[in-house]
């Protein structure tokens, strides 16, 4: 018989194939995260799919590395994204960049209580909006390479924006914030620093032309040598090019995208 739940509780499923990690997360949630109700624990891909389909959880803690596959295999087979996901992993692996790209949460094992609380509170806030998890949808699209355009999730003060990377012209530091300059004269201000986006966009033909600016190399119109050297972008804007980055910039521009 299913337990009657408080409507305010987050129905939570834990997917973890390592017994110690599984029990540790269960205990941390019970002790430090009131308002989370663990409705199922799964060790395998098959058990996880069954639990998600049966309990329709609000929140899933999903181990990336499973003995017979990955947490991503579960998401691909479930094919529904009306729950929040917090990935868990013991390694800073290849998937972390993709997770950050879509502004999803992850926890490194052993799990820190403060980080766990933060992840749960963020999941609760998003659930109160009662919307499909578009972050997760675009994450899976990017991961599977089904779309030619990669979509990055940008968190502004008001909302989450899902932006095609090809629509970004340049990215500039604005103190501790970052401004994205987009096509159609749009701008977005996000509360993360430029270095984080330099790492995320490094595989998408973005280059840091000086200490406070990244440019989309596909949006470069020309390089002007006079006045110390500067770049003209297709929207007509300019970006300074530091002398120490000039050689690398020209090398990258000579490569095919």
Image (cartoon, rainbow, N blue to C red):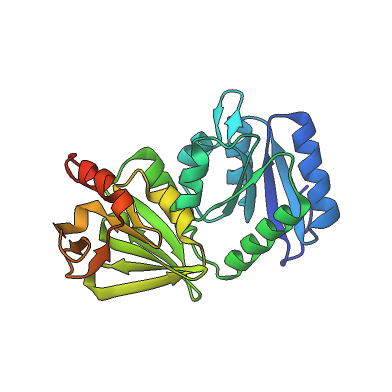
Q: Residue at x 47, y 55 (%)?
A: 195
Can residue 148 be seen in the rendering of this structure? no
Front residue of 104 and 204: 204
* Furthest-right residue in this view: 31
Estimate the x, y position of residue 235 in percent, counting from the top left. 18, 68
Is 149 situated above or below 95? below
Q: Residue at x 72, y 66 (%)?
A: 7
Instruction: Give the number of marks.
Output: 0
Relative side of 168 to 226, left or right: right
Estimate the x, y position of residue 239 in percent, counting from the top left. 26, 64
Relative side of 125 to 37, left or right: left
Is 77 situated above or below 123? above
Q: Residue at x 79, y 32 (%)?
A: 20
- The quarter in which the C terminus is drawn is top left
Is 158 situated above or below 225? below
Q: Residue at x 69, y 42 (%)?
A: 14
Can residue 74 be seen in the rendering of this structure? yes
Front residue of 242 and 145: 242
Estimate the x, y position of residue 229 in percent, counting from the top left. 21, 60
Front residue of 196 and 211: 211
Relative side of 197 to 89, left or right: left
Estimate the x, y position of residue 41 in percent, counting from the top left. 72, 39
């Amino acid at each position: 018989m299913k337990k009657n739940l408080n409507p305010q509780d987050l129905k939570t499923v834990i997917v973890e194939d390592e017994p110690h990690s599984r029990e540790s997360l269960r205990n941390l949630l019970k002790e430090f995260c009131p308002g989370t109700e663990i409705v199922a624990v799964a060790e395998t891909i098959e058990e996880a799919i069954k639990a998600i389909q049966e309990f329709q959880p609000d929140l899933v803690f999903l181990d990336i590395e499973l003995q017979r596959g990955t947490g991503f295999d579960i998401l691909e087979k479930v094919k529904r994204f009306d729950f929040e996901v917090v990935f868990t992993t013991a390694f800073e692996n290849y998937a972390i960049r993709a997770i950050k790209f879509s502004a999803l949460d992850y926890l490194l094992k052993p799990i820190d209580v403060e980080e766990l609380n933060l992840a749960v509170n963020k999941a609760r806030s998003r659930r109160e909006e009662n919307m499909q998890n578009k972050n997760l949808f675009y994450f899976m699209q990017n991961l599977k390479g089904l779309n030619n355009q990669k979509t990055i999730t940008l968190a502004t003060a008001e909302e989450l924006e899902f932006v095609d990377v090809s629509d970004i012209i340049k990215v500039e530091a604005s103190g501790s914030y970052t401004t994205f300059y987009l096509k159609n004269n749009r701008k977005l201000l996000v509360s993360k620093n430029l270095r984080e986006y330099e790492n995320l966009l490094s595989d998408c033909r973005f280059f840091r032309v000086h200490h406070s600016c990244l440019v989309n190399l596909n949006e470069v119109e020309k390089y002007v040598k006079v006045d110390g050297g500067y770049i003209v972008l297709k929207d007509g804007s300019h970006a300074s090019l530091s002398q120490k980055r000039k050689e690398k910039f020209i090398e990258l521009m000579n490569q095919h995208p």
